[in-house]
Amino acid sequence: MSAVLVEFSVTPMTEGEMKPFVDSALQEIKKAGLKHEVGPIATTVEGELDRVLDAIRHAHEAVLNRGAERVVTDIRIDEKKGGLSMEEEIEGYR
């Protein structure tokens, strides 16, 4: 199956510092062994769609498990026949 690019962000609905919650979410992406790039607003993940979505589900759950009462996770999927890679998409911009 071809690789897709998925951009996601988790927003814990909690008071105080958000970084520990975001760190918990990112740890799940790292555990999945997927190529990813953290940005200032969202994280882009590259891989087979089912694996990426499963990792994002675990990231979402990690925020709840860390103690957030509520979490909102936004997901955008970019899929192209033949596959995509982050390198190809940003070629010429960096």
Image (spheres, grey):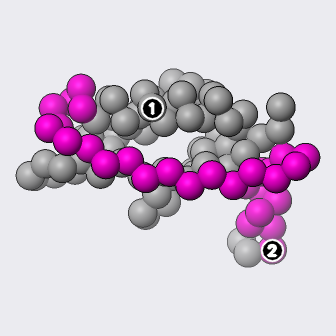
In the picture, the disc for residue 94 is none
Sequence-first disc among 2 and 1: 1
Horizontal side, residue 47 vs residue 22: left or right: right
Which one is nearer the viewer's eye here, 38 or 71?
A: 71
Task: Give the percent coordinates (x, y) of residue 18.
Answer: 22, 50
Q: Which residue is mark 2?
A: 92
Q: Amino acid at mark 2?
A: Gly
Q: Quadrant of the N terminus?
A: top right
Task: Give the percent coordinates (x, y) of residue 53.
Answer: 56, 35
Q: Quadrant of the C terminus?
A: bottom right
Residue at image point 63% right, 28% down:
51
Which one is nearer the viewer's eye here, 47 or 72?
A: 72
Mark 2–mark 1 distance (CA, rounded to whole Å): 32 Å
Residue at image point 56% right, 55% down:
76
Q: Which residues are magenta?
A: 64-92
Residue at image point 81% right, 74% down:
92
Q: Amino acid at mark 1?
A: Arg
Residue extending furthest toward the bottom: 93
Q: Could one spot residue 19 in this view of the protein?
A: no
Residue at image point 50% right, 51% down:
75
Q: Could one spot residue 40 in this view of the protein?
A: yes
Q: Which residue is mark 1?
A: 57
